[in-house]
Image (cartoon, coloured by chain):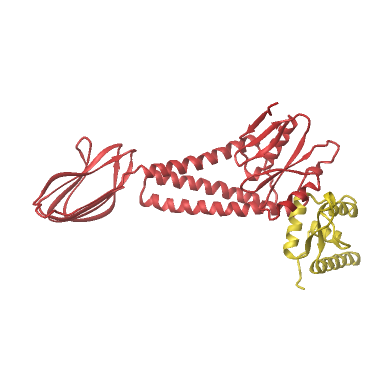
Chain colours: A yellow, B red
Amino acid sequence: MKKSEPLSESYYYILLCLAKGANHGYGIMQMTEELSKGDVKIGSGTMYGATSNMMKKGWIREIVSDGAGFERRRQYQLTDSGRDILRAEIKRLKRMLENAEEV
Amino acid sequence: MANKYKYSFALHSAWNYQNEVEEMDKYSENGWQLVKAALFHRKYVKNDKIRYRYQLDFRRIEDKGRYIETFREQGWEYVDSTINGWHYFRKIYDPSLPEEEYEIFTDRESFNAMKKNWARIALVIAIFGGIMALIYGIKLIMVPSVPFLLLFLTFLIEFSVLFRGVLIMRAKESKRKRNRYRDSVLITVFFLTIILGTSSGISLAGKRPNITVNRIPEANEESVNNERFGDFEVKYPDNYFLDLGIESKDPMTFEVVNEKGEAVYKITDTSFHEDDIRLNLKKGTYYFSMSCDTYYNLNCNIN
């Protein structure tokens, strides 16, 4: 895999929130707020732009879940390459953190 | 009961689009709610029972269903879009919520990407204007006349205003102070200049005479003496351009004559070829006149 650019905070959290399974936009937004204890928010414009881009890159894909009414909605799912990107980013962040502790 | 509507024709520049958001917020506070957003105006309906906060997004949407759903998930109602790609959203205002609940961009990257996206499209239009300004600039130097001057200035203004907008939108951080009133006036003047400049330039260009005469002697024609031909009308004072070609055995006199019978241009020669002879003509009617004993060919064009 080629060395990629560091992910933006929004991209990173979206991928992270999908690591355990598919989720919809609102779920990702809530989970991000919970994980970051309110520090990171993903607004609608940011969310649409990031999900569109990551779908183009093939990191996530869209699935429409079965169910009636409100339950029937779009969800996003991590792809294999998206999982690789997330792993590489976590590794990079870990290394940066370890380096900070060494100094 | 009939609905009460109100229209706002205040134009805002894309690089100060927050002015438009402020306008819509202000209207909503006063009980006027947006129903339609177009390129040059917005339509509001009276409803005092609710108050919204607005946001604008600029992008080319690939999947409108997913787009609207992504906004709806966070309480944003899609209102309308303009033809050039601005999308209008609103959220019911709750004073107890923090201000960031009314933001749609929560990081620098996505906000800059939106602005860059606008800048990319505007740059194409600006470059088009720049090329047109260059073309009309060259034409103006070669053929100095009012329509070319108007078109040159119009495209030059289009290019410079849009290019400046592109630079502002591409800048990472804008530190300028926004002035809603001044921005509205500037953008209105900008659009009026483009519309009036191009339409009057094209209409003046269409009003110019375009007379071409190619005259060769008829079979038994001996000579011509002060023959009048090619009457044309000048509708506005400007430089007009004469292309003239004379071939004759005896010297030919060619004149451009005004309605008082005065020659505004006169030449006597046996062989003469020249394009774009500049004649500064006033409003009025004119005609050509020729005199010659033996000639072979005369051709002339005025435009």
Taking depth in this image into account, of B291 and A44 the one nearest to the observer is: A44
Q: Is residue B81 visible?
A: yes
Left or right: residue B116 versus residue B280 is right
Q: Is residue B105 visible?
A: no
Residue B235, quarter of the rendered image? top left
Left or right: residue B142 versus residue B44 is left
**Residue A85, horizontal then vertical, whole percent:** 80, 67
At x 39%, y 52%, the residue is: B139
Residue placed furthest toward the top:
B1
At x 86%, y 63%, the residue is: A19
**Residue B54, horizontal then vertical, whole percent:** 73, 40
Left or right: residue B290 versus residue A85 is left
Whether B240 is drawn above or below B249: the answer is above
Residue B9, quarter of the rendered image? top right
Question: How many discs mark residues in the rendered view?
Answer: 0
**Residue B68, horizontal then vertical, whole percent:** 74, 49
At x 85%, y 40%, the residue is: B97
**Residue B102, horizontal then vertical, whole percent:** 78, 42
Quadrant where the image shows the N terminus of chain B: top right
Residue placed furthest toward the front:
A68
Residue B88, quarter of the rendered image? top right
